[in-house]
Structure formats: structure tokens, C-alpha cells
Amino acid sequence: MRPEATFATVDERVAALNGRYRHHAARAVFKEALNARETGRVALVSSFGAESVVLLHMVSVDRPSLPVIFVDTEMLFPETLQYQIDVASQLGLTNVQVVKASRTQLALHDPKSDLHKRDTDACCNLRKTEPLEAALTPYDAWITGRKRFQSGTRAKLDFFEAEGDRRIKINPLAHWAPADVQDYMWNNKLPRHPLVAQGYPSIGCAPCTTKVAEGEDPRSGRWRDQDKEECGIHFVDGKIVRGPLNKEDAA
């Protein structure tokens, strides 16, 4: 289902959606977003990380055939790869699409798989942002698990955001607190990512994710000691945050 022509721009569709669902609960936002005329063709993007199972469970209840895009950066923890397989099977998800970076681009920009040591932004761009952008090409909207409490860049997150001039980003859990996430997982007896119990409340690629000590921000283990909060697939203050493949590309 394509977005209705009545809404000429993405910004207009986002404004209509936020106005309609501003006071709705996360569960209702998720369910209605799958069928709203403004969203068109929708996919869920999931990292199969620490809290991903919440939205994956909602998919399994409302539309098990919904496309679920999983970007395998080929630098993920082995536990994440196994968790992806186990959760998809347990929840009966029938349309998980595993995407990876172009072999040509990897050979050109990261032949030794050590780009993350020199330029984490470029590595994220190569292994996550570009493959995801290609995978999202057929879709008019995509669902994320981002929440306001996760970082300063997400503090004003709305249920719906404009991504450029052609796609909508849907954040059903934007207003959830950590307790809401845990309650949902507990009440629905959902499987936990095995690394959470080992001190990883936020899980990304293995080289750039460290354990988090008690009292630290849950995302402090991501790109520790770097001026970096996002991998590059999300917008901050209306601008997409992503790194160039090399310094010369920055211009």
C-alpha cells in the first residue's frame, strides 16, 4: 500500500501521524502504523540486540510476514548471530532478510577488516549504513526500537519522523522507560539476549562494544571514549549522522 496522494510530502504525512497518535500507547502506534495510509510499505529494522525482541514479538502477533531487515556487519558477536536465528524461529517470523556490505566495497575500503581501528564512522557507514539504505529502497517507512531514554540525541524523539524527503521512520517505543521494556519482556516470557546477563545492556559490533559498569549509562559501552553516539543510520536534529568512507570523501 503506497502513501495516499493527499499528503504531498513526507513532512505532511509525519505531522498527520504524530497528531493522530500523539496520545496513543506504543502497542497501538505499532499496530496502526502497519496499516496507516500515510506509511505505505513498511519494514522493521532490527539489530536483534538487547531489547529488540519487544518489537519482534509485536511483529509475530500482528504480522509475522512483515519484512524484518537484519544488517549483519560481519563484526557482530557470535551470540547475536545465534540469537537472531533462535528468536526468528521461536517467534515464527517468516520474512527475516539478512543483508551485508558489498563484497566489492569491502575489498576496496576494508580489505583487512580493520577499518574500525582507524575510522569508526567510516566502518559503520560501509558495513551498516550503506547496506541498510540499499535494503530499505523498496519501502516508504521503517520501524525502529529507539527510545527517548537511550541518549541525549534521542531525548525529543517522536513516534514518527521524516527521513529525508521520501521515507518515514516509526518509533513506537519512543516514550517507553526501561521498566516498560523489561515488563513487556517478562510478561510475554521473551528470550533475552545472552550477553545482557554478562554486562552488555546495549549490544553492537564486537570490536566497538564493551561491558557497562553498574551506574553507567546503558549505552556507554558503545564506542567508549569516542565522541560518537549513533552508528549513522539515524537522523539527529534533522540531519543524518553518518561518516564518509575516507577523509577525502568528507568534502
Image (cartoon, rainbow, N blue to C red):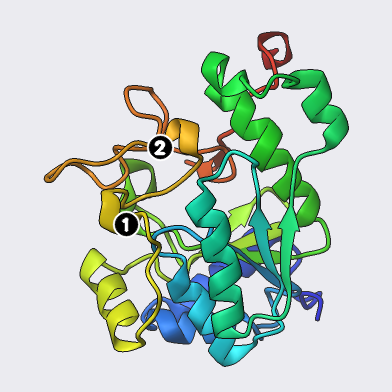
Q: Is residue 41 above or below residue 224?
A: below
Secondary structure category for the residue under label 1: helix
Q: Secondary structure at mark 2?
A: loop
Residue at the image position 68 percent from the left and 48 percent from the top: 164
Task: Pick the quarter of the image with the N terminus.
Answer: bottom right
222 over 162 or under it: above or below? above
Give the position of the C terminus as an image quadrant. Answer: top right
Decide if residue 142 is on the left or right side of residue 50: right
Outermost residue toward the left in this view: 215
Q: Residue at x 51, y 55 (%)?
A: 80
How many discs appear? 2
Residue where numbered disc 2 is placed: 209
What distance separates the C-alpha of mark 2 from that of mark 1? Answer: 12 Å
Q: Report x, y in % for residue 84.
A: 57, 64
Q: Residue at x 74, y 53 (%)?
A: 99
Q: Is residue 205 left or right of residue 181?
A: right
Name which residue type carries label 2: Thr
Q: Which residue is mark 1?
A: 196
- Which of the 4 image quadrants contains residue 107? top right
Left or right: 109 in relation to 191: right
Q: Nearer the viewer, residue 90 or 138?
A: 90
Q: Position of residue 161 (x, y in %)?
A: 55, 59
Q: Residue furthest top?
A: 248
Residue 209 x/y as whole percent: 40, 37
Residue at left 33%, top 78%? 185
User: Is residue 156 rendered to the left or right of residue 205?
Assistant: left
| Residue 146 in view (yes/no) | yes
Residue 156 in the image, given as x and y percentages of width and height: 36, 53
Amino acid carrying mark 1 in the image:
Val
Q: Residue furthest bottom?
A: 61
Please tell me which of labels 2 and 1 falls first in the chain.
1
Depth order, front residue of 243/74: 74
